[in-house]
């Protein structure tokens, strides 16, 4: 509303560009008169206009404050939602990491048991080598004894 009044006062004062005054019938003497009115200070505003302007500024300020309040509320809600999601993700990650740790410990325990079983078997196999050598020696002795018995039995 105030803009329309300002445009009218600017047009009346002759402050519009020369192109916009074509066909208005303004001659150079009226241009000089309008220049002299432009140089004069604007007339003082009466109290009602001043109060109306203050009221408009106050209304705009309240609207801006409400807009900022709404914005901050929505930002707070979004931040709370994101924070809640982050906390849930951290709890989920913690649970998954705990389960992975338990699984890794179980697998490590089973691996250690397997390794210990293999080491025991290896030790027992070393004893089997000695046993195999003894069996070979025993076999050779039995073969020698068998040959001697066969020779004795063929003598007649």
Image (cartoon, grey):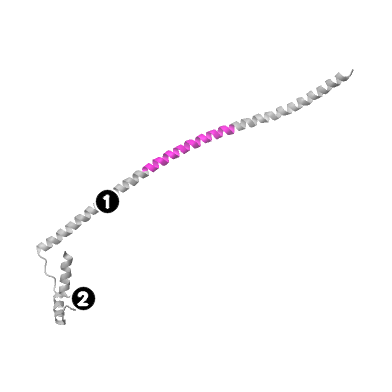
Q: CA distance from mark 2 to mark 1?
A: 46 Å
Residue 89 is a magenta residue: yes
Residue at the disc numbered 1: 72
Q: Residue at x 66, y 30 (%)?
A: 125
Q: Is 38 situated left or right of 120 in this image?
A: left
Q: Identify the image quadrant of the N terminus.
A: bottom left
Q: Residue at x 13, y 61 (%)?
A: 52
What label does residue 55 carry, if any? none
Q: Residue at x 10, y 62 (%)?
A: 48
Residue at the disc numbered 2: 20
Q: Quadrant of residue 86?
A: top left
Q: Which residues are magenta?
A: 87-116
Neighbor class of circle 2 (other Cα within 10 Å; few <14, some 14-19, many 20+) is few
Q: Identify the image quadrant of the C terminus.
A: top right
Q: Is residue 37 above or below residue 107?
A: below
Neighbor class of circle 1 (other Cα within 10 Å; few <14, some 14-19, many 20+) is few
Q: Position of residue 64 (x, y in %)?
A: 22, 56
Q: Is residue 40 above or below residue 89?
A: below
Q: Is residue 108 above or below residue 48?
A: above
- Report the label total: 2
Instruction: Single out the residue that lies furthest toward the front.
Output: 23
Q: Position of residue 43 (x, y in %)?
A: 11, 70
Residue 127 is a magenta residue: no
Q: Residue at x 17, y 67 (%)?
A: 4
């Amino acid at each position: 509303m105030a803009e329309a009044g300002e445009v009218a006062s600017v047009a009346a004062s002759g402050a519009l560009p020369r192109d916009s005054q074509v066909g208005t019938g303004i001659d150079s003497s009226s241009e000089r008169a309008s220049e002299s009115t432009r140089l004069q200070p604007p007339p003082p505003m009466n109290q009602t206009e001043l109060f109306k302007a203050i009221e408009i500024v106050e209304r705009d300020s309240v609207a801006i404050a409400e807009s900022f309040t709404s914005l901050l509320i929505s930002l707070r809600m979004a931040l709370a939602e994101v924070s809640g999601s982050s906390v849930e993700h951290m709890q989920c990650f913690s649970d998954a990491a705990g389960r992975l740790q338990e699984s890794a410990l179980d697998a490590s325990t089973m691996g250690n048991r397997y390794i210990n079983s293999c080491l025991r078997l290896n030790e027992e196999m070393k004893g089997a080598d000695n046993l195999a050598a003894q069996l070979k020696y025993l076999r050779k002795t039995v073969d020698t004894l068998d040959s001697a018995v066969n020779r004795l039995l063929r003598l007649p």
